[in-house]
Each structure stands twice: as C-alpha cells, then as structure tokens.
C-alpha cells in the first residue's frame, strides 16, 4: 500500500532512509567483507538494545487504555523477552559472545542515544509517537533483509553473514514487519491529523539517523 503511514514517513526523509538502508555496514554484510570484530561489536550492542526495546513495548502497553493495543504491546514484549532474546543469545554464541559477557558490556554512545530517544519519544508523546520511533528498526530490518536476499549482487555462498540476511528476509520476520506496518496504520487512523504528520516525520527521521549511527558504531568499533 503506497500511501500508508510508513511509506509517507519514509518518503519524507528519503536521503536519510537511503543512508541507513544502504550503509557501508549493510553493503559489507551483503558482500561478506565486514570485519568480524565489527559484527561482534554490533551483536553485543544489539543485545543491549533489545533490553531497551523490551522496555519500549512495556511503555507502549502503559501508554494506552485500548485492550487490543495493550495485548499487542504485551505480545511483542513477551516475544522479545522469551523468544527473541534467547535466539539472539544462541546466535551470538556462534560468534564467541556469551550472555554474561554481553550483559557486562558498556553501552556504546550510539546505543544510548538511540534507545533513550525511542523511550523519550514514547514518554513525551503517545503510543503513535513511540511506534513511529520504533518503525525504522522493526520495519526497516525487514526491508533490508528482503532487499539483500533479492539482490543478485548479494553473496550468500561462503558468506559468514548469510544467516543474518536470511533471518531478516525470512517469512517469520517479514510477518513481524508487516504487523508493525499495519499497527502504524491502525494508530494513524485513530490519532493522525494533518498538523501532526510533520512532528511524526521528524521523529521518524531522527530514529532513521540513529539507526545509521548504530551501523557506523559497529563498523568503526566506536565505544
């Protein structure tokens, strides 16, 4: 659906969206040339990010009195805490990272900036503000995974990062991304006004820039 809320938000910051989805980190994943240390740094920080991601869905449940919306937020929270975290830990173990070591990692500046921005967006606004701040991550990873998997230039054979690409291109993750897209539309139907769109676009743009900064953090091993 070309005119849904996510598409409109993305169209409002095309240059930033391209800088995020086409970042060197992503291109090097696709080529299989990313330094292992960069990927390990990214994975460790992504573990810390997931903890705050769970907090964001807990906040989403708190910010609404609509039972359907509350159940959706709690289901996402449960999925992160009891499924996604375990899968992430198992995946990271294959890269020499265990949960104890990742828990002890200091948060990188990019991790702090992004996660606190998402939480502040939700605390200062309503659940629409919060889901807009989360959208570049939840929906964006699905778009990146699908694009890389479909690109004939992506190296999948003998690429250490092929499993990462396949994970986000998978039917399971695409369903998550589509669900988040639909959730944005539902909230937009209830709460979006023409005057409010510009503020939401600013939130989306900033979250997109912070996503690109997260890639850059991994690429350069930034603390």
Image (tube, rainbow, N blue to C red):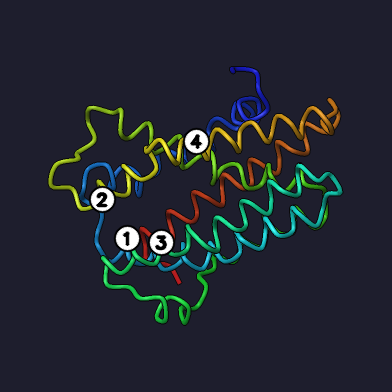
First along the sequence among labels 1 and 3: 1
Spatial CA distance of label 4 from label 2 is 22 Å
Disc 1/disc 2 C-alpha distance (Å) = 9 Å
**Distance (Cα) linking label 3 and label 4:** 18 Å
Determine whether 93 is above or below 6 in the image: below
Which of the two labelled residues, at mark 4 and mark 2, occupies the earlier sequence position?
Answer: 2
Q: Which residue is mark 3?
A: 88
Question: Toward the viewer: 72 or 42?
Answer: 72
Residue at numbered disc 2: 161
Say which of 12 and 69 sits in front.
Answer: 69
Q: Element at badge 2?
A: loop
Residue at 61%, 64% (x, y): give it.
52
In the picture shown, does residue 87 fall above or below 137? below
Q: Position of residue 16 (x, y in %)?
A: 54, 38
Pointer 1 with pointer 3, Cβ within 8 A: no
Q: Which residue is mark 4?
A: 175
Q: Residues within 10 Å of mark 1 (few under 14, many from 20)?
A: some
């Amino acid at each position: 659906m070309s005119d849904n809320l996510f598409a409109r938000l993305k169209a409002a910051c095309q240059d930033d969206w391209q800088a995020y989805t086409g970042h060197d980190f992503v291109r090097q994943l696709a080529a299989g040339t990313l330094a292992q240390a960069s990927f390990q740094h990214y994975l460790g920080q992504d573990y810390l990010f997931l903890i705050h991601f769970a907090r964001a869905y807990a906040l989403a449940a708190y910010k609404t009195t609509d039972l359907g919306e509350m159940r959706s937020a709690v289901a996402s929270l449960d999925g992160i805490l009891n499924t996604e975290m375990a899968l992430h830990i198992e995946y990271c173990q294959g890269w020499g990272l265990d949960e104890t070591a990742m828990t002890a990692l200091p948060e990188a500046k990019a991790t702090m900036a992004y996660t606190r921005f998402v939480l502040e967006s939700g605390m200062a606004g309503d659940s629409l503000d919060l889901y807009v701040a989360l959208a570049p991550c939840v929906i964006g990873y699905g778009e990146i995974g699908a694009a890389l998997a479909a690109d004939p230039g992506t190296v999948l054979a003998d690429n250490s990062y092929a499993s990462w690409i396949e994970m986000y291109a998978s039917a399971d993750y695409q369903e998550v991304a589509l669900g988040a897209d639909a959730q944005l539309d539902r909230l937009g139907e209830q709460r979006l006004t023409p005057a409010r769109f510009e503020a939401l676009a600013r939130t989306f743009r900033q979250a997109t820039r912070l996503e690109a900064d997260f890639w850059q953090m991994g690429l350069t091993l930034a603390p």
